[in-house]
Amino acid sequence: MPAELLDIRVEKNKLREQYKNIRANIENKEAKDLKIKNKLSNLWAYREAERVFAYVSMGTEVSTFEIIKMSLQKGKKVAVPYCVPGTRELRFYYINSLDDLESGTFGVLEPKTDKCEIATDHSGICIVPGLAFDRSGHRLGYGKGYYDRFLNSFNGCTVGLTYQDCIAEKLPSGRYDVKIDIIIYEGGFIRTNGR
């Protein structure tokens, strides 16, 4: 592995630990999650989207449960990710309610693939998880590359949800990292220079 790639990996791993710690200590998380949800609901790209691709939150991530419920109530088609076993591939499936979810890879709630329709049209808005984001749209993910692979085929607007304490001026990025179009946090949003 080239030294430059090794350096980026080492730096990203250090930052992952740093931002996991920051997120674990976010104060007033529920109130901040509500503010983030409300900011998303007022975003033009969200209001206009027929399809919402959303991660199913866990742990210290910005909660998406109320976002998923809100989107379904608004009549949007909501797709959530399924990690294909033995690969680093995400497939999104449409759900009709949170009851269509079951525990899956990494303990994350995933769609019941035998009951849900696969989402083949990759347009609309995609709500992307991340430990941190920078003002240029770079994302610090969990290191597996699932979302970067999926986002290469996504044709719509990408949105990262985070807390103000998890916005960096600049994050290390590699050639396969896909930038996010908009970052939403409890205090507002940042339009990045996109993909």
Image (spheres, rainbow, N blue to C red):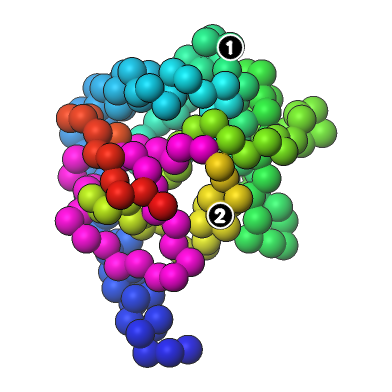
Q: Nearer the viewer, mark 2 or mark 1?
A: 2
Task: Say what secondary structure mark 1 lies in.
Answer: loop
> Quarter-wise, where is residue 12 in the image?
bottom left
Identified at 60% across, 50% down, the residue is 153
Compared with residue 18, is residue 76 higher up or lower down, i.e. above or below? above
**Which residue is at a point 18% across and 34% down the rendered structure image?**
27
Q: Residues within 10 Å of mark 1 (few under 14, many from 20)?
A: few
Q: Residue at x 58, y 26 (%)?
A: 51
Amino acid type at mark 2: Asn
Q: Relative to 43, is 1 above or below?
A: below
User: Closer to the N terminus: mark 2 or mark 1?
Assistant: 1
Relative depth, front residue between 33 and 140:
140
Kind of residue sitting beneath label 1: Gly
Image coordinates of residue 37 in percent, x first then y, are 35, 23
Q: Which residues are magenta?
A: 156-183
- Can see residue 122? yes
Q: Which residue is mark 2?
A: 152
Would residue 6 appear left or right of 166 to someone viewing this image? Answer: right
The answer to if 78 sits in the magenta stretch is no
Q: Which residue is mark 1?
A: 75
